[in-house]
């Protein structure tokens, strides 16, 4: 397919999960895959998280860009 | 709500107002709130503006990202 | 028009063409103009490309943001 | 005083106010001035904010670094 | 005018005002407009400021780039 | 609580753990929670690590900022 | 000449051309060469452009820094 | 050893694994350790990944720099 | 091939050509393809150039990273 | 010690000296070592300075981060 | 003087010296002080240099911004 | 030589010396000049260092890129 004119779109999403960074990525990728379009790849931006009153990380928040090809 | 899987989307907009930076932010936030979705927060990127022939700032242009939760 | 409240939206796309960087930009701009909205300007982000087995650049991939005014 | 050996410390704080960006800066500067030490200057980092259910900005959150000289 | 060859120059200035960020921008824009050339637009870089002994912000210092077209 | 004046402080720490990135984050968050103050959130900066003589990653070092509200 | 004390100055300009990126660079370089001083080199910053109503790129705008030696 | 003149080299690699971010790091570190030289540490750059047709992350791609001392 | 463990290496090169940016990229890609290894893709970093005494761009210098898979 | 859980803290300071950059670094490192905690390493951020009426650099101001291990 | 409206200008220069980084800074500061205007401060950007055929650094090239107040 | 097609390679190294920043640069440049290839220029990245138990800087670590032309 290399060499053919085509266009991709990138959308910025934030996935949240208490299980870890990969789980937060998968949360956002799954949601975007269903809601926006069939995705091809993702790129992680910021990684953040919330801390509970007991000092434990209660969730990971991963900002990522997901990309998909715009249909002809 | 912390700890539950969820996904947010961020959209980049530019608000313009002659009144000032906060007014330019509110212009974009109001528009995005109506047009795109119910917003949760915003993050300011670049701040720019136009200068008139008399050397007065005629408008402020604020690039910002607005974020909202993708519905389940 | 300077001085009037208004809002623009920026969308991130990737244009691909084997002909060169300007052609890759035009590919993405044309597609976004048809698919998303009538564009006003673009801003180039990253420039990348694919290399074939013979060491020739087979395509240019230009990441750019395209902008358009949100209608009143 | 220029030319004399001395040391400053910078601390990162976030000021929050519903009134605007300058008010959010003053909130953080006042608090840091009392809590940490007598400040000399500040540098604005990120500007963010929260949006209410009615699409109005309910508060500005300004990340800034405040600086003060370490006493001899 | 779009499509015609032309050249702009950008100059970096710092505007200072005790009244706020927009006032500091206007101070620098007015000065550059008179001293350098008739400006077209500005882009804000850093925002800093000085803190008085009483913990009040005594002035805002806004680093900005101002732009004007080089005459034919 | 949105809309009320308040101030947060951010502190930069580095958590180290051989178990992985999340464990390194939790190490730093737990320590800062006890030593500095009750934390609200964290933001990951750099991720680094050490490699043993056998080519295995012996520990992950995660630079992060932790944030907490300054008490009234 | 390496090893001799000397000083260069860098000036930021924006070249505009409908023909492409290299033409936009040459436009700014030619203008600065005549208007400012005899240039030695240039460094490209941002690449932007305008889109016409038909979705065609009507001009490329290249922000670049041009450098020249300050005469002894 | 601190205080002795020495030189390190950094090499940029991309590790790929379907198992997660730490596994992708270990893949690249192991390969570089064998192919290039005995490594001392690594620094993570970008984190990216591929998404399959079912919306599941099929692999993590971690860009990292690995460092080793140049022998005397 | 997605999902299989593998490692890529990135090398930074600068291609120079008087013909334009794409030609400078191809110069570096061809050279690296022969000298270093069979390349898969490239990523453009800085774009610079030299200006002759007549104010014409005499060459384009494109800093790019080229990437190739490390063999099993 | 590699492989054991531990936490470091980084603090941002500015060292000032008329003697040069290394002297400004040592000024800040010595002060932080006494005032804050026993330091392990430092990382230079910005380098700035003041210029006297005669055009001579009257002092160097080096922004740096100093790091130390938080005690168990 | 804090609190009074005023404007500064920043100019980007490159100082070159074989003696070291501070000497390269002083070269540019002295030149700009005479050629452009009476300077107040400087900020170091990039530090580069040339290497002779014998592997010795033959000169340091320091890119810096110098600042001065625009007269009333 | 300007205008002729050619290719340079950049390699990232870290020079360490207790004597100062210029000495650390020279350490890395000398080593790379012997080990890798005959260098043309260098570009400083990060400047770091180690602090001894007495609060004295025991060594400077300078991350730099060194560049050399790939032979025809």
Image (cartoon, coloured by chain):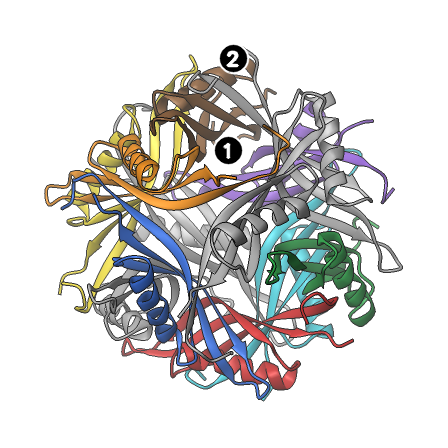
Chain colours: C yellow, D red, E blue, F cyan, G orange, H purple, I brown, J green
Residue extending farthest to the left is G54
Left or right: where does residue E7 sit relative to residue I3? left
Left or right: where does residue J67 sit relative to residue G31? right
Q: Which residue is depicted at the point 60% across and 81% down?
A: D32
Q: Foreground residue, J42 or H10?
A: J42
Return the x and y of residue E17 as percentages of the image width and height: 41, 76
Q: Which residue is depicted at the point 57% across and 31% down?
A: I5
Above-or-below relation of G43 to I72: below
Q: Foreground residue, J53 or F33?
A: J53
Return the x and y of residue J69 as percentages of the image width and height: 78, 61
Estimate the spatial distance between the alpha carbons at disc 2 and disc 1, rounded to whole Å. 29 Å
Residue tagged 2? I34
Residue tagged 1? I3
**The residue tagged with tag 2: helix, strand or loop?**
helix
Above-or-below relation of C57 to J33: above
Q: Is residue H22 visible?
A: yes
For label 2, count other residues whose C-alpha is less than 10 Å away and answer few (under 14), some (14-19) or many (20+).
few
Return the x and y of residue I34 as percentages of the image width and height: 51, 12
Question: Which mark is in front, 2 or 1?
Answer: 2
Q: Which residue is depicted at the point 56% across and 74% down?
A: D41
For label 1, count other residues whose C-alpha is less than 10 Å away and answer few (under 14), some (14-19) or many (20+).
some
Return the x and y of residue D14 as percentages of the image width and height: 52, 74
**Which quarter of the rendered picture does the C terminus of chain C lie within?**
bottom left
Above-or-below relation of C9 to H70: below
Indicate the chain on which mark 1 is placed: I
**Which quarter of the rendered picture does the N terminus of chain C lie within?**
bottom left
**The residue tagged with tag 1: helix, strand or loop?**
loop
Query: Residue G23, labelled with which disc?
Result: none
């Amino acid at each position: 397919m290399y060499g053919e004119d085509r266009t991709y779109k990138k959308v910025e999403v934030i996935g949240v999960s208490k299980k870890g960074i990969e789980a937060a990525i998968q949360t956002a990728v799954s949601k975007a895959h269903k809601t926006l379009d069939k995705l091809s790849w993702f790129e992680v931006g910021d990684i953040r998280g919330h801390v509970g009153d007991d000092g434990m990380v209660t969730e990971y928040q991963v900002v990522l860009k997901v990309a998909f090809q715009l249909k002809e």
